Image (spheres, coloured by chain):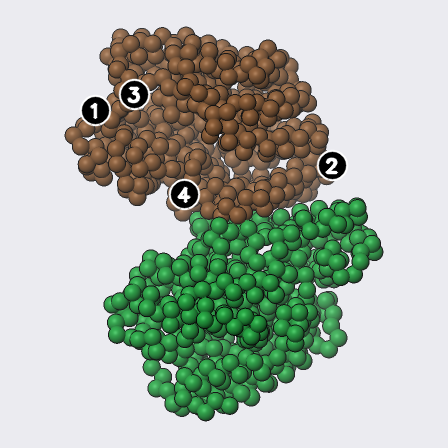
Chain colours: A brown, B green
Amino acid sequence: MVAMSADRSNEVLRLLEDRLATISDVNSARKALNWDRHTYMPEGAVAARAEQLATLSRLVHEMLVSEETGELLFGALEKLEPGSESSDLVRRAKREYERAVKLPNRLVEELARATALAQPAWERARARSEWASFESHLQKILPLQQETAECLGYEDHPYDALLDLYEPGAKKARLQKIFEELKAELVPLIREICALSDGDRSPPLYGRFDEEKQEGFVRKVVSDFGYDWKRGRLDRVAHPFCVSLGGPGDVRITTRFDPGWLSPALFATLHEAGHAMYEQGIDPAYSRTPLSGGTSMGVHESQSRLWENLVGRSRTFWSFYYPRLHETFPEALGDTDLEAFYRAINEVKPSEIRVEADELTYNLHVLLRFELEVALLEGELSVSELPAAWNARMEEYLGVVPENDAVGVLQDVHWAAGLFCYFPTYTIGNILSAQLFDEATRARPDILEEMGDGEFGTLLGWLQENVHRYGSRYDPDDLIERAIGRPLATAPYLHYLKDKFGELYGLNAA
Amino acid sequence: MVAMSADRSNEVLRLLEDRLATISDVNSARKALNWDRHTYMPEGAVAARAEQLATLSRLVHEMLVSEETGELLFGALEKLEPGSESSDLVRRAKREYERAVKLPNRLVEELARATALAQPAWERARARSEWASFESHLQKILPLQQETAECLGYEDHPYDALLDLYEPGAKKARLQKIFEELKAELVPLIREICALSDGDRSPPLYGRFDEEKQEGFVRKVVSDFGYDWKRGRLDRVAHPFCVSLGGPGDVRITTRFDPGWLSPALFATLHEAGHAMYEQGIDPAYSRTPLSGGTSMGVHESQSRLWENLVGRSRTFWSFYYPRLHETFPEALGDTDLEAFYRAINEVKPSEIRVEADELTYNLHVLLRFELEVALLEGELSVSELPAAWNARMEEYLGVVPENDAVGVLQDVHWAAGLFCYFPTYTIGNILSAQLFDEATRARPDILEEMGDGEFGTLLGWLQENVHRYGSRYDPDDLIERAIGRPLATAPYLHYLKDKFGELYGLNAA
């Protein structure tokens, strides 16, 4: 709360900041327990840790929706000049408060209980590819999500109410337009490419890759990016994630290593480092306030995807790093040259699993989920019809019919976790990553040359200056306008994809 | 809260249990953050983590001293049958509540602030052996400790008020008698031994010991003891400790490895495992209640010292493990045989540092601190006179004058941390460890034979049955009576020491 000193004379604001700092501290503790749960917690701790996490979540909610918080918020807001940092802070806190008070305790608890039961059920169901055993859980969660949307309120569509939790200001209608634009270009492009390629799995990414050496390699790359190890660390988990444990001084990444497959370690680590550098770049003065943390999931994803794809799957990047990777794995990579490797990491191949999808097909996986969620929320689609609807759309958009539900409708944890309307933030991130990269390289032409030398200071500096440092101060649309002078739009992203994959597959790029 | 179901009809009790469970969860979160601080936290997180720890401590205190907790406590107590588990639970909670409400918030905060500042100051002062820079901190802490004692209240001596925080029911007068008994026997015994030995550092413990191999060895021993890895883990830290993160399902130990010195890894790990097995052995039904956790620091120390010394420095134990240790370090241990190794790990040698002291001299280090604390609390000794008083007593009891204050009065963190009157629990633990081991081997004569085969199931089983499972249900004196049928007494411990070291040094054991 360094930056707020100008408003120190405002006693109500000071009390509010203290209260929000307490809430933030408890929330950071909750995140630390969660990090530990995924990294080092012994298995015997599962039950006790679940209680601890539930207790901390409840305390955060109780402190947020308390009368005292409400009074301080409205009291503080009266005395503030619009546009000041303090006013942005209070506005953001007020939104969280107003959202939280709209939800009855009963609903919050029912949803917490339903999702706590649904997640292990989902894990078992996925392991056995047994939709029926998960269906009943989703039957309970869907109406609770619909009720949540009704409580939160919306103008046009219940989807808007839930989407706003992850992407403030985004609307279903705008997403629909975005997906139409993507579909119109990507579906034919993917068809064209698939007609050309033989569909074999690209050999250079498979083989024997010592895990310690993989770790050494990705640690070096992430260091070169500018991830600050004094304010973070890297640990191994089953499902990689990034977490900020209370401001830019402690932003940890996690990853996984597959000894027979290079992709997860490479791209998951670069991806999580992208998230982490965003959090490390936020103004430290925002720590322990609602302005700490990225402004939305979509903007967050733009950072991870930028480093993973725009940088990490580019020819320029690998012109520097491939010789080093080859040195690390001379046997496994054998006589694969830079070009063959570049082609392997950018192979377009429609497949069942979203998280393993290439850049072209990825967004169709999201589109499918978006359409199904809309239909579910509207009541046009019932939970029991979901697997058939999933498979039909997979065939339509990607020409793939999942072999079973485990690699189909059961593949993601999101619905079990109550995260309806979250998926589109991945596509927003993809689109925005291209716009930001375009603007950064336009403003600082050195970026591309530096990338070819394994240097990223100018790129990271531009992102820090135009995106990171603001934390949650500006809503996504506002932040995007400030950073690139125009709103979110698909054209630059589509241009990037058609350019890159047109060249890769020898098509006449549009 | 499984075991409390019989009282479920008591609604007040149920509400109290919920509240205590919440307090326990937040406290477990605090301990998890602290574990992380010492193991894996990046250095950039220091400031934010300090805020988080302070916030969680404050919330625990606020919830404990709230009117609501008080009303529930007294309401629940009315309806309970004395001697039931629920009544023991409420009685323990009431003691914590009554202690906490006696301390004004101002005093709690002043002490928190003073010790938060004193600890880094102590670290710097110790590193530079610069008493003067720490003295001013202790000048502030001492009156706050005196005030704490006055607020808590006592019958005979302020020492009793503070000692009771760590060792419920213990009194300064009784400690004085205990130390008199120890001093009377140990001082002449140590003199006699020192007159015989040449004072050289025992060579087999020094040399080159690969850290990974050290870790492998101690992990094996601790597994043999019966430490359950599914409910715990081992990590490396600068100053080893053990912590329970919310019940017997998550009890972690930490240790350190010195590549040139075998003792720290061996004995610190065995010591911490002793603490950990106590916590792992507590009735799981007590989790999230004030009955979870060991009943006192002295009883806790009896467990760590029993495994470290009565087991881990015995000839029987090493008759099994020394061949294995030698196999692990054939070069460093060379032609050292079991007997030479046994003598090395039990060398009596008065030295400056408590935590490195042998079994005979250890308690004199504690006695010295006890006497100085009494004099400080009484006002008989001023803070500025402390270094001289320290050195004078060191010379009197151990014939050693510390080379400088870093290895003298500045060696322990306790006073900087506000832990006055804590040291004697180490000696209570030593005394009790001998009594418990005597009783266990009397009741189950197989224990010694098993120890010689690297088996400890009967010993651990006896401890679980008679000590561990009760958690904090019984106060130390009550627990000791139940376990061994008589009160804490120095005779068995002195007998053990005279027997062991008389044989080792060829004296006419009394």
Give a yes or no on whether discs 4 and 3 share a subunit. Answer: yes
Q: Name the amino acid type tagged 1.
A: Glu
Q: Judge whether B367 appears above or below A74 on screen.
A: below
* Foreground label between 1 and 2: 1
Residue pointed to by mark 1: A339
Q: Judge whether B232 appears above or below A468 on screen.
A: below
Crowding near pointer 3: few (<14 within 10 Å), some, many (20+)? many
Say the numbered circle drawn on residue A347: 3
Q: Name the amino acid type tagged 4.
A: Asp
Which sits earlier in the primary sequence, circle 1 or circle 3?
1
Which sits earlier in the primary sequence, circle 4 or circle 3?
4
Residue at 63% over, 33% down: A113
Relative horizontal placement of residue B65, taking residue B309 as reference (left or right): right
Choose top left, top right, bottom left or bottom right for residue A315.
Answer: top left
Task: Looking at the picture, tell me which residue is in the foreground, B395 or A87.
Answer: B395
Name the spot of residue A317 as percent of width and height, x first. 27, 29
Residue pointed to by mark 4: A235
Q: Secondary structure at mark 4?
A: strand
